[in-house]
Amino acid sequence: MSFDTLAPHYHWMEWLFAGNKLQRCRTAFLDRIRAPKNTLIFGEGNGRFFVEFCHQFPYSKITLVDISEGMLNQARHRLKRAGLDEQNITFIQADALEWVPPTQAFDLVVTCFFLDCFQKSELELLIPKISQAATPKAEWLGADYCIAESGFSRFRSKLIVSFLYVVFGQATHIKARSIVNPAPLLQKEGFKRHQREEIDFGMLYSEWWGREPAALHSPS
Ligand SMILES: C[S@@+](CC[C@H](N)C(=O)[O-])C[C@H]1O[C@@H](n2cnc3c(N)ncnc32)[C@H](O)[C@@H]1O
C-alpha cells in the first residue's frame, strides 16, 4: 500500500474521521496572507486546500510537489470539477526529500498535514531545503496534528495520533512514528510565527509564519 492506494479513499476517510476540521486548519489563514506571486505546495494530497487557494488567489503561480501520482490525479480532477484550469500550475511528482527546488523562488510555502510524514532527521534536511527555496520575505502556512498540552486532551491526542501513525505507517512508506514540532527548525531559517490556532482539544493546529512582520491589513 502507499499514498497512491489511499488517494481515492482519502476524502471519505477524512470526512468520517474528522468532518471539516482538517479543512478548517488548512484554510485558517488564507484571508490574512499577502497575495503570493509564486506558491510552493508540498504534499497537497487530493487538492482540498489547493482548490480553495486557487479561488482566493487566481493569479498566483503554483508548484505542487507530491510523491503520489494518485494524489496528484485527485488534485487535478478536483481542480477541473471546480471549473479552474491548470494554466498557472506545475504538478511535480517527486519525493520532497530528493527534489531540488529553485533558490529563493517562492513567496509562499504551504505544508498541510505533510511535515508529520517525516522523522526529525528528515525534517532537519527538508526544512532548510524548503527554506532556501523561499524568498527573504516569504510566508509559510502549515497545519498538522500535535499533542495537546495537558490533562485529558493530552491523553486523547496521544491516543489518536498514535493510532493514526499505526494505520498510516502501515498503509504508506512513511518512517515517522511520532509528531515532531517543526517550529524550532522554521525559526532557525528566519521565520517568525504570526499566528497559531488550535482546534479539536488542541490536537489540530494551523500556523501562519513569515520572514517579515505580518502585512498591515492582517489582524494581529
Ligand atoms: C497525510 S497526506 C496530507 C494531504 C493533504 N495535504 C491534506 O491536507 O490532507 C500527506 C501527503 O504528502 C505526500 N507525501 C508524503 N511523503 C512525501 C514525500 N516524501 N514527498 C512528497 N510528498 C509526500 C502524500 O502523497 C500525501 O499526498
Image: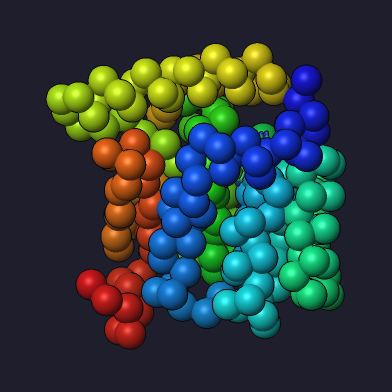
Q: Is residue 134 above or below residue 155?
A: below
Q: Which quadrant of the figure has residue 184?
A: top left
How many dots with numbers? 0
Q: In this rendering, does residue 99 appear at all?
A: no
Q: Is residue 80 above or below residue 3?
A: below
The residue closer to the viewer here, 119 or 86, is 86
- Coordinates of residue 147 in the picture (x, y in percent): 31, 29
Q: Which quadrant of the figure has residue 51?
A: bottom right
Residue 158 shown left or right of residue 54 in the figure: left
- Coordinates of residue 169 in the picture (x, y in percent): 61, 18
- Coordinates of residue 24 in the picture (x, y in percent): 45, 56
The residue closer to the viewer here, 214 or 71, is 71
Seen at 61% across and 23% down, the residue is 168
Seen at 53% across and 48% down, the residue is 112
Residue 38 shown left or right of residue 219 in the figure: right
Q: Is residue 195 above or below residue 95?
A: below
Q: Is residue 153 above or below residue 104?
A: above
